[in-house]
Structures are given as structure tokens and as C-alpha cells.
Image (spheres, coloured by chain):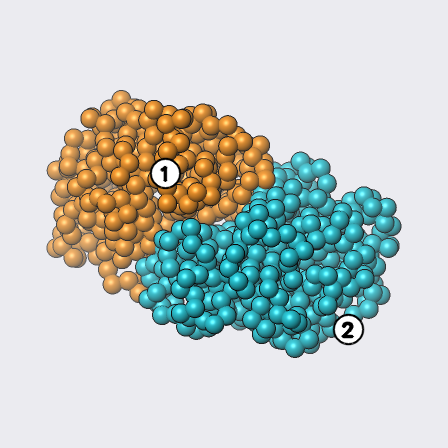
Chain colours: A cyan, B orange
Amino acid sequence: MRDVAIIGIGHTKFGRASNTLLELFSEAALQAIDDAGVDLKDIGAIFQGAALPGFEEGQVTPPGFSAAELNLSPIPATRYEGACASASIAIREAAMWVASGEYDVVLAGGVEKALSMGTLYATRTFAMACHAPTEGPVGLTFPGVFAMAARQYSKNYGISIDKLREKMAHVSIKNHRHGALNPLAQFYNKLGDLKVEDVINSRLVADPLTLLDCCPFSDGAAAIVLCSAEEARKYTDDPVYILGTGQGSGGPLSKMEDLTKPVSRISSARMAFKRAGLVPSDIEVLELHDCFTIAELIALESMGFFGWGEAADATVEGLTDLGGKIPVNMSGGLIGKGHPIGATGASQVYWLVKQMRGEAPKGIQINPVPEYGMTDTLGGDLGTLCHIILGRTKK
Amino acid sequence: MRDVAIIGIGHTKFGRASNTLLELFSEAALQAIDDAGVDLKDIGAIFQGAALPGFEEGQVTPPGFSAAELNLSPIPATRYEGACASASIAIREAAMWVASGEYDVVLAGGVEKALSMGTLYATRTFAMACHAPTEGPVGLTFPGVFAMAARQYSKNYGISIDKLREKMAHVSIKNHRHGALNPLAQFYNKLGDLKVEDVINSRLVADPLTLLDCCPFSDGAAAIVLCSAEEARKYTDDPVYILGTGQGSGGPLSKMEDLTKPVSRISSARMAFKRAGLVPSDIEVLELHDCFTIAELIALESMGFFGWGEAADATVEGLTDLGGKIPVNMSGGLIGKGHPIGATGASQVYWLVKQMRGEAPKGIQINPVPEYGMTDTLGGDLGTLCHIILGRTKK
């Protein structure tokens, strides 16, 4: 198997888009292709994440039409659907096909128009990634899932709900501060100076989570170009290598022992670390799935960056901020940057590459430029997990 | 890269199912696992095709829940969506991951509940695999697409529409005769003795296609177990090897020069033949995507089994029937067996393996047992194509 490098990246503005799904994907894809400097004729396949395109635009199976828009027909073009982890899975598969030698250069990414669906319809549609036989009928939606996780966290570690709300608020404050500095973020120049009281006093969504504990609905797309590591320097002086990936699955919530310790994530992260030959302390920048503030804490602990119950205080102490032990979601994360479901995993990779090239916007660039970065993407209510570890040097 | 073998197969009854999507998939998967004789703990990943589960049951992202039902959590479990080609793509990807050495044993397949959606809703939802910006607004549905293809075929080869209807009827007669002999087919014991007049006088759906020119809506699932070829004989005396696969994409119909010569299929079939080191004359059994009678003719020509315009007469002459030059859709195909969208590609592979083990039902088993077989699966309106070539011996 060959080593694989990322040689081009593209990313639309996140927020509300007037373009179609296909146009959004093309925008990100053309940026990535231009950034890589590859010829269209060299692209062997498209790997596209999209979670709900049928509900958003009555467009099932967009990848073939994306290939046509990009003048890439008739190359293989495949849709991967793992709810919010769709693009991460697409990138993981793309890396495998390049590693295998089947393709030399491929395009991978994701697209979604979740905001344009309308908020009520979006909530209902998102919830279809829950277990339909047992969770749909009781009206479970994602804010409810993570509210339950927050209560479990409170109980596990003897933190009162009021205290936990204060601690969780620091995730929102940090990620909104970063998002406000990111020109492609949905909340660019907004909400950059939140106080704890702003978060805990914002509108209650699912007790104890308030509006500012939640990521927004978003439209957007992101894409990357991958090639074999040996060819990468033909295209760029700054290749970023995919050192390892992991993926895991989880069952209905009723079968989970503890929502704050999802086996799907623990298993997936371990797989990625093992493939990369790295441990959490090697990682210098982390883009993780903060769909809600509590989700960031759970992710940090499940991936091994902090001990069980320790991520809340670590966040309050700034250990996950710029200059801290492990800077988390410097892009703004889902909370500050936005969350176009099927595009999020590709956006996370985009922002790691920006960091590792030293090209992140002022105020959110880590210095010195990080050597190793990692993404964490969660699909459904902990049902699909995917991790990707990147490095500036090959293993 | 390692050679890959199929060591277990499973298939539900096609037709109307009272079970859920997850239950249907589990039924086929457990059959395949039992048939292979593998331990659950040896299965490394699930590759699942499903086209419209969100519309059918409000269940997006079923694979993780399938893993849980099969007691396989937290292994990676991924959904592939290429409309009617979903399961074929899932199997193609599964073969790649096993070939790469990443997994030794995996489960792949597909599931759909298209009939249970209701016919009107199903037609509308299926049509979402058309190009939403240009084809959705004009009310295009799949019968319309293939009616246009039939008219193009008539024009290309100077065959009057009335004559073409007679010729197309022979596809329906053949595939229904086979389906009537297949106990797992939707039309088992039904429609096995059609006459040309029955087909051309059945209800008009989209001129010139009548009801008996069309495949039905169906519920069902099919699954297979794959492993590395070197391990296959540990599990079975009759491994069937995946010799080559291909995939192709096509754009909106407005960009296609000729609906009867889809570049997506030509490209995909060539890729599969090249990987397998075979040519059409090597293939002894073919399961192809006869969503409509005209579709079978187009497929046969695009894949190189007959010259342009020659498949219609070849069918009338029996060259695609048992004992003919290339027996096509001995299972009944989509027309006789049923078409649970996301499961169809896995069903095609199931029936090839049955043929190559000599286990097909009486009256539809090819003798001598075929050495090489091929599937052809079409997603959307020629937007996604996938081909899989199987052999009883390794290359």
C-alpha cells in the first residue's frame, strides 16, 4: 500500500447559500483542483459525502452529476452517507483507493444544504439518523440525545447541572471566538466575545443545552484532492500526508451503557492512532465534532486526550485553546464555523491542512506550524464515527 | 493487492415485506454468514447499499444499526448510495478493502423497502435520482427516461415502434419465465407463460412501454461474505472469485448524445473486463439491469455482447436465453425477480454464485456450470454504472 497525500483544498463560505447542492460542491471542488494544480484528466474518481440531498433538493445520488459539472464524466463517482460523518468516510475511502494503486489522483469532499431546508424540517430530517424503530417514535432529536449525555456526564462525575452549564459554556466561548476570526465561518465577525452568562442565559433548547451550546444548521461544501505520496511533490511544496484513519459503528442508544463513553468513538480513534503509529500526545491540532458543547468534552475524553471527566475543567483552564496542551477547533468547529452535515468532515480536513501549511487566518493560526493533526467526526447519535490523522511528514 | 473470493450468500424473498429495513438486511446477512461458516468476530466491516431508507422508514444511515443487530458493533459500517446500483458499489468497495489487506472477512449487500412505500410515492421518490435542476422540474420519471430510450432505439435502427414493442416483449417473456421458476422472486409461479400480445396489450405506462415492459417495485435484501482468496478454501469448497469490477458516471440526460449508448456503462464495463482480463465472449452467465425491457437491449449492446442495434433480434432468436450464446437474467432479472433498489446489485451477485455453484433452481440452472459470470447494475437515469465479473477460478 502506498502513502497518500493531500495536495489541494477547497471550501465554500458556510452559512446560507443560494446556489444548488451541485453548484456548491463544484465551487469547493474547483478550488481544490486549482489549489492542487492537477489536470482534470488526471482525476480518477470522485468520493462525495452528502447526508440528506434527497430531502434538501430532491436530488438523490449527486456525485455523477458533480462529475458531469466538473467535466469529469465518466469517471467513477460515489456517494457515501454516514450522516454528519459522510465526508470523513468519503475521504477515508478515497485514501484507501489511492493507497491501493487503483487511482493516482482523486477528488473527495462533501456538500449539504441543511440551513436552506428550514429549521423545523431540518430538525425532523436530521433525526432520521437516530434508530427509526425505537428512537424515532419517541420523538428523539439530536439536541435531546446530547442533553441526555450532559446529564449522564453530570451524574458520572458529580458535577451539578448548573456547574456543568458553566463549564460547557467555555466550549461555546472558545469556538465562537475562533469562528468569529474565520472568514469562511457562518458566524464570522459575530459572537466572538461571549461571556459565560450569554451562553447559559440564551434560549433553552434541550435542558441543559441552550441555543449557544448548539451548532447551527448550515449550507456549504468542502473538497480535497489526494494523490500518492510519491507524486505529491510534483504538485506542491506543502503536501500533507494521511497517516492513519479509523471508523467505528454504534447501535441504538438503548443498547449503550454510557452515552459519554461511546465504544464507536473509542474503537475508531484507537484504529486511527494505531495506523498512524501515534498517540494523543503527538497531536498538535484537533478538529472535532462539537455539534453541542457537551459533545466536545465527550470527544476529547473518548479519544484519550483527557481522562474521563477531566475535559470540562481542562477546557475552563484553556488547555484546549490556542497555546494550550491541545488546541481544539481553531476553525470555530461546528459551533462557530457551521455544520453543513455531509461537508463537515472535509471542512475539518481543510482547516487542518490550512494550519499545517501555516495559512490559517490571523488569530487562529497555531505557531509553530503543527506537525500532526487529527479530525473527529460523528454521524447520527454516536452511530458512525470516523477519524483521520494528518502529518507534515510521512511515517 | 490480494485476490478476493465470495464464500457466503444470503437473499430474502423479494416482494412485499412486513419486516423493517434492518430486519430484512439482518435476514440476508445471517444467511450469508451461516452459508460462509465464518465467526461473527472475524467480520471486519459492513458495506451496505440502500438508496432511499430515509423516505421509506425515516431511517437514514442504517449500517451502524445493522452492525448492532448482528452483534458486530463497533466495526466500521458504511452506507453506499448510487440509486439502483447501491449494492454493487458497496460490493466493489468491499472487494477493494479485502484486496488491500485491511480486512480479511467482510459483509456486503443491500436492502430496500420500495414496494412498501406505495406506488405513487415510490415513483416520485425514485425520480429524485434524476438530475434535480433540469429533469425534476419537467416531471421526468424513470419510465419516461426509458420510453425515450426506446424511441431513440427505434429511430437509430429504423425499427418501427410497433415492431420494437414486439421485440421488447421477448425480454419480458424470457425474464418472467425465469422469475416464475425462482422461489425467491416476486413473481414466483406467476406470469411464467406470457405471450407477445400479453405484453404489448398490458396497461400503457410510458409510450411505448407497457406495464409488462417494467420491473415492479419490491422490498428485499441480499448479502454476501467476502474474504481473501487464500483463505477462502478454509470456509468453502466452492469459492467464487471477484475477477474485476468497474464503475462509471453519467451526467444529465440533456448532455447525453444518445440514450442508447451511455458512455457511463461503456466505460464501466470496459474497466471491469480489463481488470478481469476477459472479453464478453468469455462470460457464460449475465445478470443485467433490466429495469425495463428496452434497458436489457441497451445494456447488452453497451457492454459489447452484441453489436449496436443487434440485441433486439438476438433476444427474439433466443440467444440470451438458456442454451443461447449468453444466458441473461436466468434469475428473472429485475422484471421477473423484483427490484428492491439498493439490494439489486447484491441479488445479482447472489444469483451468479448460485449458478456457478450449480445450485440455481430447476429450469434456470445453466449446464455445464458456468465458469465466468458478470453483473451489470444501473443507478439513476444512466448516472451510475457498476459491473462485477466473477469466476470459479482465480486469474
- Residue B370, given in percent of the width and then of the height, sits at 23, 31
Residue type pointed to by label 1: Val
Residue shown at the point (12%, 55%) measured from the top left:
B158
In the figure, residue A74 lies in which quadrant?
bottom left
Count the numbered circles shown.
Answer: 2
**Residue at the top extreme?**
B362
Mark 2 falls on what kind of element? loop
| Res B229 seen here | yes
Q: Which mark is residue A193?
A: 2
In the rendered structure, the residue with mark 2 lies on which chain? A
Residue type pointed to by label 2: Asp
| Res A119 seen here | no
Residue shown at the point (45%, 56%) measured from the top left:
A3
Kindly indicate whether the residues beneath marks 2 and 1 are on one polypeptide chain.
no
**Other residues around mark 2 within 10 Å, as few (<14) / some (14–19) / many (≥20):** few
Mark 1 falls on what kind of element? strand
- Residue B212, given in percent of the width and then of the height, sits at 28, 39
B222 with respect to B313 (left or right): right
Please state which of residues B13 and B267 is positioned toward the viewer in this rendering: B267
A62 with respect to B314 (left or right): right
In the figure, residue A37 lies in which quadrant?
bottom left
In the rendered structure, the residue with mark 1 lies on which chain? B
Q: In the rendered view, would you say B102 is above or below A66?
A: above
- Answer yes or no: do the residues labelled 2 and 1 have beta carbons within 8 Å? no
Residue shown at the point (77%, 73%) measured from the top left:
A193
* Front of the two marks 2 and 1: 1
- Residue B133, given in percent of the width and then of the height, sits at 42, 64
B14 with respect to A394 (left or right): left
Please state which of residues A235 and A311 is positioned toward the viewer in this rendering: A235
Mark 1 = which residue?
Answer: B4
